Image (tube, helix red, strand yellow):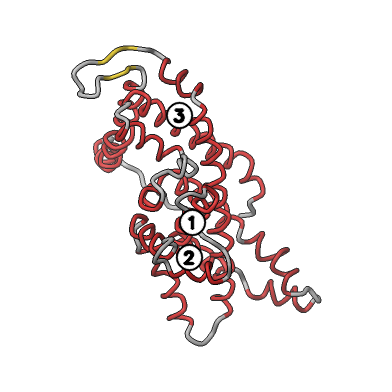
Amino acid sequence: MEKRVIFKGWVLPLALLAPQVAVTLVFFFWPAGQAIWQSLFIPDPFGFSMQFVGLGNFEFLFADPYYRNSFITTAIFSTSVTVATMAVALALAVMADRLIKGSGAYRTLLIWPYAVAPAVAGVLWLFMFNTRIGVVSWYLGQLGYDWNHVIDGGEAMTLVVIASAWGRISYNFLFFLAGLQAIPRSVIEAAAIDGARPWKRFVTIVLPLLSPVTFFLLVVNIIYAFFETFGVIHTITAGGPQQSTTILVYKVYADGFVGQDLGSSAAQSVILLVVVGLLTVLQFKFVERRVHY
């Protein structure tokens, strides 16, 4: 028999909802409203005056080739980070699920990188790939490859993708491992008895049963790549060289806090919010259809 909680009045439900509503209003709706309002103006860099321009900031942005290129850069970066993170995490989770001896230590070591802040992770990878003292760049030089992410945009993008994905693999690993352990062993054993090879069992049984976890991580990782990788990019490349690693969220910072173009920065934050919202809606509308709960 299903039990339901029934409140006799409206005071207690309102009191229970009030903290979350207050947090949402103060930390989401109020800043979002301020950004929309400021995007309609060109403020004085010193904050003494504001000139109303309507949609002028948006028109200027979409006419700017550097801003249009940041969309392509963001798409390449977010896709690369998401695919690399989820693929490596799934492979590690499959191995951890089969490991017997030392499984606790193995899983603990894999979780550690998640505790490292993005800015710290950026500094660590920057030292390893430093063109003069980096151990990885030195080994690449011994192999005949001259690594220099300071002047090569492709190498800079590769480095920030690796650093961003490395810090997120642990988070994905935990969810994939929990999903694998929740799959009934009897189903996999029945397929093995029927003659299905390990790869066939993984593709036809394990992956479909992992689809809810995969879908959740897909949404979370894309949002992570759009917003939470700012520290990695800022510490490693600062958007360079020649804005080859300037994603949308970093361009908001560069134009607003460095260039002091507050109106354009506010307009960019509004566009970024709309883009991420549309991506999330599209994922729930089309990708979720393939999810088997």
Q: Secondary structure at mark 3?
A: helix
Task: Look at the numbered discs 1 and 2 and tell me whether their residues touch, using CB distance below 8 Å.
Answer: yes
Residue 218 rendering spot, x and y as whole percentages: 54, 51
Mark 1 residue crowding within 10 angstroms, few (<14) / some (14–19) / many (20+): some
- Closer to us: 257 or 215: 257
Gap in angstroms between the C-alphas marked 1 and 2: 8 Å
Sort mark 3 into few (<14), some (14-19) or many (20+) by Cα contacts within 10 Å: some
Q: Amino acid at mark 2?
A: Ser
Q: Amino acid at mark 1?
A: Asn
Which residue is under mark 2?
137
Q: Write the residue at 41% across / 19% down.
A: 57
Residue 236, placed above or below residue 69: below
The residue where tag 3 is placed is 271
Q: Residue at x 67, y 49 (%)?
A: 290
- Any mark on residue 76, and which? none
Q: Position of residue 128 (x, y in %)?
A: 42, 65
User: Mark 3 or mark 2, which is nearer to you?
Assistant: 2
